[in-house]
Every structure is written in C-alpha cells, then in structure tokens.
Amino acid sequence: MLTIANLLDHSDTQNVEAYVANSPEHAVHISKIMNQSLARYASAFAGKLVEDEDEANAENKGAARISCREKDCDVDSCGTSNFCQDYAPIVCYLYPKFRPWAYAPQHLILE
C-alpha cells in the first residue's frame, strides 16, 4: 500500500485502500463486463515467435516475407496478402498471422 500511495503521490495510505480492497465477487463481475471487449486487444499481442521463414511457411502456407526496407533486412513472415505492406513491419506486429523470426534483426525495427 505504501508503494501505491507513493506512486500516486499520496501523502498517506488512507485513500489507497480503495485501490486494493477487492473481493472475488468484484473480480467475477469485472470479468463478465470486460473480458469479451478486451479479448481482441489481448489476442493482438499474443503473436507467435518462430525459428525462421521455413517454420512460418509451415504454419501459414505461402506466407509473405516481410522486409524492413529502411534497414535492408528481412525480419518475419505474414500469412496474408502482399498488398498490406505499406507500413510493414510495424503494423504487422498486431496481426494474428504475423510470425516474427527468432533470429532476425528485430532490434533494427526499434531503431
């Protein structure tokens, strides 16, 4: 509670109780309301890392090779049409058929 109070810039913990006081019934109620609407966002970040292009193609036949043109390297595969590569590979990370290669230079994308 002290950590939460400190992070919220509270001078004491008297108001922090509202943040930490919860019951299993509250959790069930929140889950019923939020799970369905948040599922699509959660699944967007549940991408699967593959060893290489061969493994990506084994999962998604005919997957397209995705390049980072600015860095002149190939980094992953995607089992979709080639027409969506305008903002590749950045937008690809949210696509369910996107398969980043484990040993590709993913760090170059961050640059």
Image: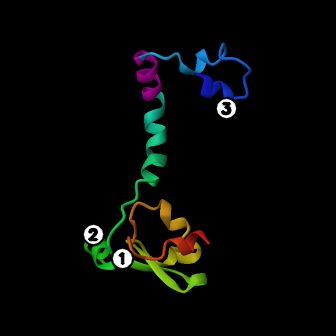
Which of the 4 image quadrants contains residue 52?
bottom left
- Write down the residue under mark 1: 63
Q: CA distance from mark 2 to mark 1?
A: 9 Å
CB within 8 Å, label 2 to label 1: yes
- Write down the residue under mark 2: 59
- Write down the residue under mark 3: 7
Circle 3: is it few (<14), some (14-19), or many (20+) Cα within 10 Å?
few
Residue 79 position within the rendered picture, expressed as x and y whole percent measured from the top left: 37, 71
Which of the 4 image quadrants contains residue 51?
bottom left
Kindly identify the residue that appears in the image at 53 percent across and 71 percent down.
Answer: 107
Q: Is the C terminus in the top left, top right, bottom left or bottom right quadrant?
A: bottom right
Between disc 2 and disc 3, the foreground one is 3
**Stretch of the chain drawn in magenta:** 24-32
Question: Most prominent secondary structure in the magenta stretch?
Answer: helix
Q: CA distance from mark 1 to mark 3?
A: 45 Å
Q: Secondary structure at mark 1?
A: loop
Amino acid found under the numbered disc labelled 1: Ala
Kindly identify the residue that appears in the image at 30 percent across and 76 percent down.
Answer: 57
Amino acid found under the numbered disc labelled 3: Leu
Residue 96 position within the rendered picture, expressed as x and y whole percent measured from the top left: 40, 60
Circle 2: is it few (<14), some (14-19), or many (20+) Cα within 10 Å?
few
Kindly identify the residue that appears in the image at 52 percent across and 16 percent down.
Answer: 21
- Asked if residue 50 lies in the magenta stretch, the reply is no
Q: Is residue 24 left or right of residue 22?
A: left
In this view of the protein, can residue 88 be seen by the observer? no
Which of the 4 image quadrants contains residue 39?
top left
